[in-house]
Amino acid sequence: MTTCESSTAAVSSATAPQAAVDPGRWPDVATPPGASRVRTAVARAMVGRALRQLPLRAQFGDATVVGQGGPVLTVHRPDAFHRRIGRYGLVGFGESYMAGEWDAPDLVAALTVLAAHAGDLVPAPLQRLRRLWALQRPREQRNTQGGSRTNISHHYDVSNDLFALFLDDTLSYSAAVFRALPATWDLLAEAQRRKIDRLLDLADVRDGSRVLEIGTGWGELALRAASRGARVTSLTLSREQRDLARRRIDAAGLSDRIDVRLCDYREARGTYDAVVSVEMIEAVGAEFWPVYFRTLDQRLAPGGRAVLQAITMPHERMLASRSTYTWIHKYIFPGGALPSVEAVAEAVRDHTGLAIARRDAYGAHYAETLRLWRERFAEHTDDVAALGFDETFRRMWTFYLAYSEAGFRSGYLDVQQYLLTKEDTRR
């Protein structure tokens, strides 16, 4: 489409039974790959070397224990585990969990240790040869306009009912801002509204403001902006999100103030007093960051404000892994790419006339947000199954939430709120 559509736990034993995997639905999970003996041996040696240096306690099979102590990781089927890593690296590590070949009584704790040492798990000489051994991102996941629609649909169109099981009543799928940590579930909706109000305050959204939202979500930010008297144009590539957002907007009686469009950000037109984009840049792709930031600049009226919420990673790790194909790309967010603080600053400086007026980080709040989502998802296992999602999917989603939480708990990931300003040259 080229024209925007518009309208108003306990540790498992070493002999635990393998998870039942549907080979039609999960072909790469159902059967371990036929990795060569050399690759498997190298993987076994590298995994052993890495674990011996970590504060983990990894048990392989019935007897072998590796690590310096700490969170427990139990590998039920060492041969399959090493074959997957030998053939597919960290993609294989995640697939091995999906297959039930390894487990951890505290999955987040174990993954947090691994995330904290992400830069040290592969020896430096091999890091320098990363392009020779790491899986490369497939070209079909590039975030062209057609590619972006496919990539977004893969995740966000999976099921509104699924997301509703573990998100709070605001259906906000981004980091909340709590008054204090640790957080509790009953405070999550309030913390999400606080986050949204803070973003709208930074953007100076008020009665009469013209607001462009890039990335609708399920409509909560648009609703709160419209309740201030703003007129909102909200863009999304997810049909499921668009449809539910429209229903929520109609129910609130605000359809005359909010226009939800099935539209790529590159197709946006007009100028606005404020542009707001919450955790959208992660789906843009590094190749298109200059286009994304130029779009913010072009759509923003002189004197206007753009506000972003963005997940970031360390600059050196971003550079090292920018072309690597990961488990997250394969199963959760195809085409995704996390910027660094330095990369955002560089894109704003080199491709726009905007200025970064403020940046606030609050990664610990994202860790708590993810913990609450993960716990809620676990509480609704039967409901997830009733929606038609099998055990492999449930393990995949559990791993995704725990993997993400571990990234923030270790400090490997952070989340930023940015205020970008545009000078009014008409004065």
Image (spheres, rainbow, N blue to C red):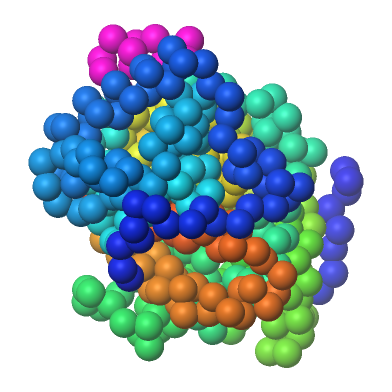
Q: Pick the residue in front: 382 or 377.
A: 382
Q: Which residues are magenta?
A: 122-133
Q: Residue at point 47% right, 61% down?
A: 398
Counting from the top left corner in percent of width and height, residue 176 is at 39, 69
Place of residue 174 in the rendered image (x, y in percent of width and height, measured from the top left): 47, 63
Compared with 295, 395 (above or below) is: below
Horizontal and vertical percent position of residue 343: 40, 31
Q: Specify the quadrant of the image occupied by residue 340.
A: top left
**In this view of the protein, which residue sits in the foreground, 421 or 139?**
139
Q: Is residue 247 above or below residue 275?
A: below
Taking the image as drawn, is residue 242 in sight?
Answer: no
In the picture shown, does residue 313 fall above or below 111? Answer: above
Percent from the top left, x then y, of residue 322? Answer: 47, 26
Residue shown at 68% from the left, 89% from the top: 252
Q: Is residue 201 left or right of residue 122?
A: right
Would you place residue 75 above or below residue 201 in this image? above
Residue 191 sits inside the magenta stretch: no
Total number of numbered discs in the rendering: 0
The reply, left or right, for residue 259 in relation to residue 203 is: right
- Residue name at image x 53 percent, y 49 percent: 99
124 part of magenta stretch:
yes
Q: Residue at x 49, y 32 (%)?
A: 84
Give the dominant element type of the magenta stretch: helix, strand or loop. helix
Asked whether residue 34 is in view, the answer is: yes
